[in-house]
Image (cartoon, rainbow, N blue to C red):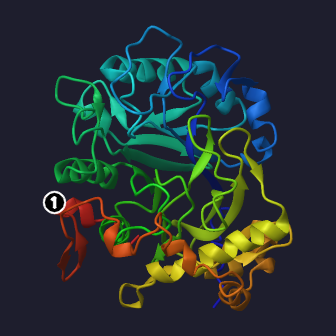
Amino acid sequence: MPFEKPEDRPLRHVVIVAAGDTGFGSHLAPVQASGGYKHGNFQTWEEALSTIAPEINGDINFANLETVVTDRNDLVPTAKTYNFRTHPDAVRHLAGIGFNLFSTANNHAFDYGRSGIVETIDNLSAIGPRITYAGTGHDRREAAAARLVEAGGTRFAFAAIGIGVSLGAARASDATPGQLAIFDRRDVDLMVDNLASADAEYRIASVHSGKERVVLPGQNEIALWRDEVAASGAADMVLIHHSHVARPVAMIGDRIVFFGLGNFVHFGTANMNDAGVCRDFSILVRVHLLDGLDGALRLAAIEIVPIRSTHLHPERLAPAEARKRIAVLNTLARAVDNPGLDATGVRFTARGDGTGLFCTALGLGNPGELDGLCNAYDADAARKLAGEVRAGGCLSGGTGTSPAKATQVSAEPRRKKFGWSLPGLQLPFFRHKNR
């Protein structure tokens, strides 16, 4: 049955664009206002982003800042393998091309100690109200806070959690700056509870999690972020990053989990262009939300844009090559199917321009509201596309793993008769489960 437009008000159409790990400095590279260095070569912000900038066209545009944001070259680096810093003018340039939502919670937030965390907070705050960020704070309360964003006539809530360093070195306390850590169940509960109780219609969680270069999420990642957090309604969208490769996309009901966005532009990361069809790309995603019959904002369509050269100058793949990567994602989607939980891995139709497309019944029933976007969606073609590329090698060869082995959170989920819950969360956590 097609969805119908409510008669009392226009149908809202809100677009969210999301990109992965982002930073503009290689290991210990000095910062300067006009650009950054990669392999000793200087590149301006404009040179790095000019090709991909037209894709940043949502009402909300998200990226994970996997870096300290500072204009100082005198900060003392933390003793670790890689230390990244980015000049604030790079973030201003990101804002100039449309980015307005950032996560700062990840394993590189602490690259220059707690002073670096404060630098990031202060420099992002100085950019002003055109951007919103979450994930780090001057103390635990700030780091755990859900931030509110107004876009497209809708109030969104956004919260972020990271890995931390050495299982706690970068964790915020009641008196010290830092972030929340996914390894500590209390931190997970606090972030999710804040997000669930926020005064907002739509909720977005950013999670820095997952084994690097492993293309499938671990069973504990699936159980926590899909089967508990998304299924309960604490988050309508979960954006996961850290693995530096694209991972499958899952739906549970009409809520969506991106298990791996990969990289966006990050001078501190490796050139993945020769890593093979399973790992040589990242994804930029474009999510379309429309009013449902109940008047609530719901998922209508997802576009994915396979990108490469994210170590220096991100660009879209040519259509024929992009089709192969979409086929890989469709093959990997089987790993996140669970019909018993109304959970499915998302399969995308490959379009002629090199983008992937998925549409829900809401999107298919309102083609005019999406400018005919869903006219190109073919579910049968999406299922068949999975067979075009042999993706079995994605799980082997030393850098792959089975889903059961790639774990991050030790606590197992708890099933209740009314849904999934996170230990320690109170009843208000479930008030959104029927949204």
Tally the numbered discs. 1
Please identify the quarter of the rendering in which residue 179 is found.
Answer: top left
The residue shown at (42%, 67%) is 217
The answer to whether 86 is drawn above or below residue 199 in the figure is above
Please identify the quarter of the rendering in which residue 231 is found.
Answer: bottom left
Return the residue at label 1.
426
Q: Residue 319, image x and y in percent?
A: 84, 66
Q: Is residue 347 left or right of residue 170?
A: right
Q: Is residue 374 left or right of residue 167?
A: right
Q: Is residue 331 left or right of residue 219?
A: right
The answer to whether 33 is drawn above or below residue 210 in the figure is above
The answer to whether 381 is drawn above or below residue 38 in the figure is below
Q: Nearer the viewer, residue 379 or 313?
A: 313
- Whether residue 232 can be seen here: no
Q: Is residue 152 left or right of residue 55?
A: left
Q: Residue furthest left?
A: 424
Dot 1 amino acid type: Gln
Q: Nearer the viewer, residue 302 or 176?
A: 176
Q: Residue 164, image x and y in percent?
A: 30, 40
